[in-house]
Amino acid sequence: MQNNTFSGLFVGQNLIRLKEVDSTNTFLRDALSKSTPFLDGTVILAEKQFAGRGQSGNSWQSEEGKNLTFSILLNPSFLQVEQQFELNKAISLALNDVLYKYFNGKAHIKWPNDLYIDNKKIGGMLIENIIQGSRIKHAIVGIGLNVNQSQFPDNLKNISSFKQELHQDYDLMGILSEICNSVEARYLQLRAGAFEKLDKEYLQKLYLMHQWSLFKFDGRIESGKILGVSAIGQLLLETTEGQKKFNNKEIEFINQ
């Protein structure tokens, strides 16, 4: 375990680097359960993560030393439990802000927690909230970003990286610093109550927003058009049968 310090107000001020860990989210959650004191904005960075997790238990595979796999601890006690997806929007926008610097209008947010360049996934996030009463005591924000990896398993379709798209290697710590600064900026907007601003920008960046596309739901493939996201994070879809709401895992995007 190695400690480093980033510049910034609080996100990344305490940076803990781990050579190998099952999952940075699990490491942080277990440490919190043992009352280990961590500063708000602490970052846990893994060189190798052998049991990384995505949404709803999906695995996240990353080539050692080539990508960013890390978790950020935030303490958003200003958010009610029913406002959990507001944090998702803020973090999604923060990551999209960084990607936009490199990929411009190709960078999109794919509901509920993926990062896309055109029609390819370049990263994702998993937010695990620890609730106390009606408030969010801790939010463990796990982030995986494909940076310098150029080869991916054949069974992983529509996957890309900085190197695949831009044909050069990038400094991992430099990109991590950019992400920390961006997360801090968006988090401060959230803390200031800029929910409408964040919601508007989130919808502007949402992948396939207002585009008729193919989705799989209710056991069949149908056309649908994303209309937005509900207050609690459900995907709002216009279908041939009218408007429907979907939770994660109730609907699948069909790549065309």
Image: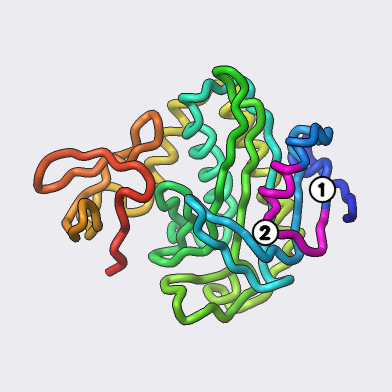
Q: SS at mark 1?
A: strand
Total number of numbered discs in the rendering: 2
Residue 157 placed where, x, y %?
42, 73
Depth check: give the residue in front, 93 or 242. 242
What segment is highlighted magenta in the picture? Answer: 17-30
Depth check: give the residue in front, 108 or 241. 241
Disc 1 marks a residue whose amino acid type is Leu
- Whether residue 9 is visible here, answered yes or no, is no
Spatial distance from mark 2 to mark 1, Cα to Cα? 13 Å
28 part of magenta stretch: yes
Name the image quarter holding residue 171: bottom right
At 55% across and 76% down in the image, what residue appears?
A: 164
At 42% across and 33% down in the image, what residue appears?
A: 199
In which quadrant of the rendered image does the C terminus lie? Answer: bottom left
Is 73 on the left or on the right of 227, as rendered?
right
20 part of magenta stretch: yes
Residue count near mark 1 (Cα–Cα under 10 Å), binned few <14, some 14–19, many ≥20: some
Residue 9 position (above or below residue 47): above
- Whether residue 184 is visible here, answered yes or no, is yes
Disc 2 marks a residue whose amino acid type is Thr
At 68% across and 34% down in the image, what residue appears?
A: 74
Residue 188 position (above or below residue 141): above
Name the image quarter holding residue 59: bottom right
| Residue bearing the label numbered 1 | 15
Residue 166 placed where, x, y %?
56, 73
Residue count near mark 2 (Cα–Cα under 10 Å), binned few <14, some 14–19, many ≥20: many
At 59% across and 68% down in the image, what residue appears?
A: 61
Residue 184 placed where, x, y %?
67, 37
| Residue bearing the label numbered 2 | 69
Residue 17 placed where, x, y %?
82, 55
